[in-house]
Amino acid sequence: MDIDRRISSFYRERRQCLRFSNHRYNNILRYQESALSFQRQLDDERRRRQDSERQNKELCSKNQNLQLHIRWLMDQSDSGVEWKRSIEGRCSQLENTNISLYQQNQELTCRCTKIAAENRELNKNYMSLVRSFQVTDDDSSTIYKRLLGLRMSIESLVQRAKGTNSANMIKGVAIQYLRDSGLLQEFPIGENLLDAYHMSIYMETAIMKILNDRLFKKPFACIFDPNMGFEGIYEWIKTRDSKMAARWRQQMCLLTAQDANTFESKREAEVKRVITALSGLLSTVYPKAEITPKTTKLCYEAFDLNYAMFGLESMIYPVSTPRGTPFNEKTMTTPQKSNPAGSVSLEIFPSFQDSDGVFYFQPKVWCL
């Protein structure tokens, strides 16, 4: 029984040992599998770490290359900024130069426009060029003074010729001359009532009428003979182009002035003709007067004045004041014993005006 129990116990223990061994074996297998699995995990982790390290190295290398490239780009950027600044400076300089050149071009354009306008004006108004040759040194102010001087010379000549209390004058001869010349027509005072004062202003009128008819109303006579037809040519040009006519007239004055011998001979001939007419009047009215030098001086003075007025750009010529015109102290002048509230009864010395209406010399009139 003991043996059986022992055997049973042995077998039981053996079975238990087998179960324990199997259990331990299974545990060992499980441990081995776990170890193998862990080993595989370690190997995988090692490979991942190696891959990560390799990737890190590649990334570091790329990062270094990228940093080098960035530094290169920064260097290029700095040089680009400097180049840009240089270009901007050059552009600014070119803009300033362009502005300066534009301003110079504008100034030159203005100057060219002005010069072109001046050239057109010079070509259009050639008479200003003719004036530059100094055909005459006179202008409006000197002409006014010379006309005033001529009027005073006529007054002085009459005063010198008549003598004290008109002792040198033959009144009947004077009245006959005035009657024949038409100066006494429509005069409000009868011939028998004319006194020494009236005769004096009438003789001034007669002298000026001779100068007017033979010189001032025939300005071409100071250059050409009337029968040469130049006055007709001038009038023909004037009706078509007044500026061209003035230019042609001044050019003739210039050419005449440059030919001293011809001009002087023409001057002498015209003055002699006027002296003859004046002397014929004065010698019959004032036979006892010695006035030849004053008469000669007056005629030369009138001729030179006529030539000067004819040679101006705007020609100055005499203009008559009609009888019956109310007296105007602003535009007329009178001698003594004239009625300032009356109207013109006698024009002693005509007014002188220019063709542009700028120049005006007051007429000397006697009013009643």
Image: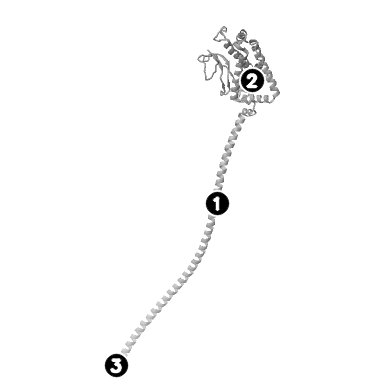
Residue lying at the far top in this picture: please name it.
192
Disc number for residue 301: 2
Q: Is residue 295 left or right of residue 362?
A: right
- Between the residue at mark 2 and the residue at mark 1, the CA separation in whole angstroms equals 80 Å
Name the foreground residue: 102 vs 1. Answer: 102
Residue lying at the far left in this picture: please name it.
1
| Callout 2 secondary element | helix
Q: Are marks 2 and 1 in contact (CB under 8 Å)?
A: no
State which tag comes first along the sequence, 2 or 1.
1
Where residue 41 appears, as percent x and y from the top left, is: 42, 74
The type of residue carrying mark 2 is: Glu
Q: Quadrant of residue 153?
A: top right
| Callout 3 secondary element | helix
* Residue 111 visible: yes
Where residue 58 appears, as percent x and y from the top left, is: 50, 67
Which residue bears the numbered disc 1?
87
- Between the residue at mark 2 and the residue at mark 3, the CA separation in whole angstroms equals 199 Å
157 in relation to 66, above or below: above
Which residue bears the numbered disc 3?
2
Q: Are marks 1 and 3 in contact (CB under 8 Å)?
A: no
- Between the residue at mark 1 and the residue at mark 3, the CA separation in whole angstroms equals 120 Å
